[in-house]
Image (cartoon, rainbow, N blue to C red):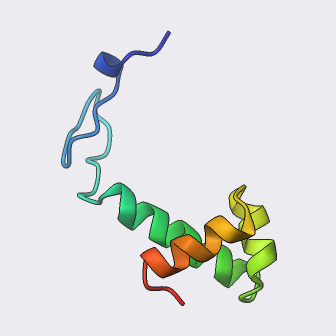
Amino acid sequence: MIGAEHLSLEAGAVQGGGIPLPAVTLDELEREAIRQALVATSGHRKNAAARLGIGLRTLYDKLKQHALE
């Protein structure tokens, strides 16, 4: 099993010669994933929601939350 001790999620953390992680928040990652899904679907929200694996209502809520409307 993978436990928390196996994960290094601190900004700039390097383990085993890996690449440092950027200092981004989960909200920023979510916002970017939504933006990319909308770009990939030419703004078609139903398809973007499906691509993200979320419901359309959830996508609308997230668009509002991240000021992407």
> In this rendering, would 21 be left or right of 45?
left
Could you say which quadrant of the image residue 61 lies in?
bottom right
Look at 21% across and 41% down and name the residue there.
10
> Toward the viewer: 62 or 1?
62
Look at 66% across and 80% down and name the residue there.
38
Q: Is residue 67 above or below residue 59?
A: below
Give the residue at the far top of this rendering: 1
> In this rendering, would 19 be left or right of 64?
left
Q: Position of residue 63 (x, y in %)?
A: 54, 78
Q: Is residue 11 above or below residue 64?
A: above
Tally the numbered discs. 0
Q: Is residue 67 above or below residue 24?
A: below
Look at 31% across and 45% down and name the residue there.
19
Q: Position of residue 26 (x, y in %)?
A: 37, 55
Q: Is residue 67 above or below residue 10?
A: below
Q: Position of residue 3 (x, y in %)?
A: 39, 15
> In this rendering, would 18 be left or right of 11?
right
Q: Position of residue 64 (x, y in %)?
A: 49, 81
Q: Report the quarter where the C terminus lies.
A: bottom right
